[in-house]
Amino acid sequence: MRFRDRVDAGRQLAERLGALRGEDVVVLGLPRGGVPVAFEVAHALGAPLDVVVVRKLGVPFQPELGMGAVGEDGVRVLNPEVVRLSGVDDSELAELERRERAELERRAERFRGSQPRRSVAGRTAVIVDDGIATGSTARAACEVARAHGAVRVVLAVPVLPRSVLAELYGVADEVVYVRSPEPFFAVGRWYKDFAQTTDAEVVSLLSRAASASAGAAADPGGWTRDEEVSMRVQSAELAGHLAVPSLGRGTVIFVHGSGSSRHSPRNRYVAGVLGDAGLATLLCDLLTPDEELDRDRVFDIPLLTDRLEEVTRWVRAQPELTGTRVGYFGASTGAGAALCAAARPGAGVAAVVSRGGRPDLAGELLGDVRVPTLLIVGGRDETVLELNRQARARLACDRDLVVVPGATHLFEEPGALEEVARLARDWFLRHLAGPGRGAEDH
């Protein structure tokens, strides 16, 4: 059985690590793919989250053969036997270390920004990746954590081949995993969704974890809620993830497009940026897993609109969200449903943001939208860009169309998703941060 995605894998892995809750633990994710898994583990254990940035020192004429690794703060671990057999002299080793350390420092600064490295000295280091194939990077990470003073090293991954276990126990005190299938082939085979984790997502997850830790230290209510939720609407039970920061500056409901889900890494990244700005977020699925298999339902905009309207009522009934303004963030087909719901009399929605959306799916209702609407489209997403230009002309409200240069439909290009998140954050803060509105206001 495969994991749904890294979030699912992280939650299953966290169940195996439950005995560590309450201990002096630091969770270290291997960037990039290990960080979403580590985020779930750290959340479940109530532990701080950081990255462990390591660079392997490969033999110059056979780079896949590691003769050591470097970590932050000048840490270097070497295998003297491999160094001797390779014939690498001190000057060659020094030059290799200089290059790898420069790249290590660049990555560490990119991921952490101004946040300090979490010390593992005298503590248990839980090193997390999204899976292990050969284990070379994981072994280096364990050695670096030990060199940084960790008194116990636990290596935790959702999936690995049984053949590497013996080697891993040579560097870790404990190896925790969920599955060890044979034959193994590759890590990605054991995930339904193994989309690449971006630098932006790593930065967002680290920032979100740091904010949660800081809030908990200063005020146990720093994050009022951050959990999976179930919402009963009509005859369906819908799933979502609700995150409510203590600032309470507004609430944004995410409506994803066809073929996606509440676990979308792109929407999760944007939600993290909004959460850091004090906005509550609900990532929700408007269809059940069985319904999502029916293509007619996936594009049934009236049904999705009805469901979104009921989900909005559910949000307003949550005690932590009483009095906050509500906005919609719609992606692809989800933007059509978001605009339809916002157009309904008494919707009480204060703002809409569409990311690569299909506003044309709102049909005649597009002209009834009266709430501030921001349309964000990639410059290379030519068909959708034209649809959004036409929609902007039809909207009779405060609206704007922003084109992200060089971006395609999924905003996968460097810096593109960060720009989407910044634009959405600023739009929602402008229109949501204030006293709540009732349904009668629109």
Image (cartoon, rainbow, N blue to C red):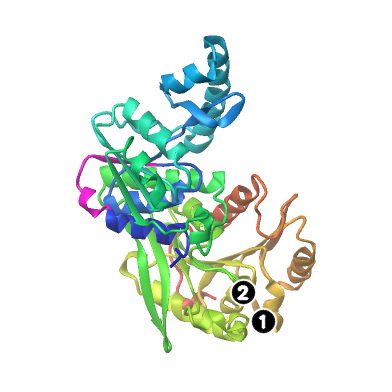
Residue 218 visible, this angle: no
Mark 1–mark 2 distance (CA, rounded to whole Å): 8 Å
Q: Quadrant of residue 71?
A: top left
Place of residue 239 in the rendered image (x, y in percent of width and height, measured from the top left): 42, 73
Q: Which span is picked out in magenta?
A: 17-28
Quadrant of the frame with the N terminus: bottom left
Residue 23 among magenta residues:
yes
Side (left or right) of 274 relative to 417 = left
Q: Give the SS element for disc 2.
A: helix
Q: Which of 130 and 229 lies nearest the eye of the viewer?
A: 130
| Type of amino acid under label 1 | Leu
Side (left or right) of 55 relative to 379 = left
Neighbour tally class for label 2: few under 14, some 14-19, many 20 plus, Cα within 10 Å: many
Q: Give the SS element for disc 1.
A: helix
Q: Residue furthest bottom?
A: 235
Place of residue 312 in the rendered image (x, y in percent of width and height, measured from the top left): 45, 75
Side (left or right) of 97 relative to 217 = right
Which residue is at a point 24% across and 54% down the rendered structure image? 18
Q: Which mark is residue 53?
A: none
Mark 1 and mark 2 in contact? Answer it, CB < 8 Å.
yes
| Type of amino acid under label 2 | Leu
Total numbered labels placed on residues in the image: 2
Q: Earlier in the sequence, mark 1 or mark 2?
A: 2
Which residue corresponds to mark 1? 365
Which residue is at a point 54% across and 53% down the rendered structure image? 425
Residue 163 among magenta residues:
no
Name above or below for residue 296 compared with residue 212. below
Place of residue 305 in the rendered image (x, y in percent of width and height, measured from the top left): 55, 81
Q: Which of 418 and 158 lies nearest the eye of the viewer?
A: 158
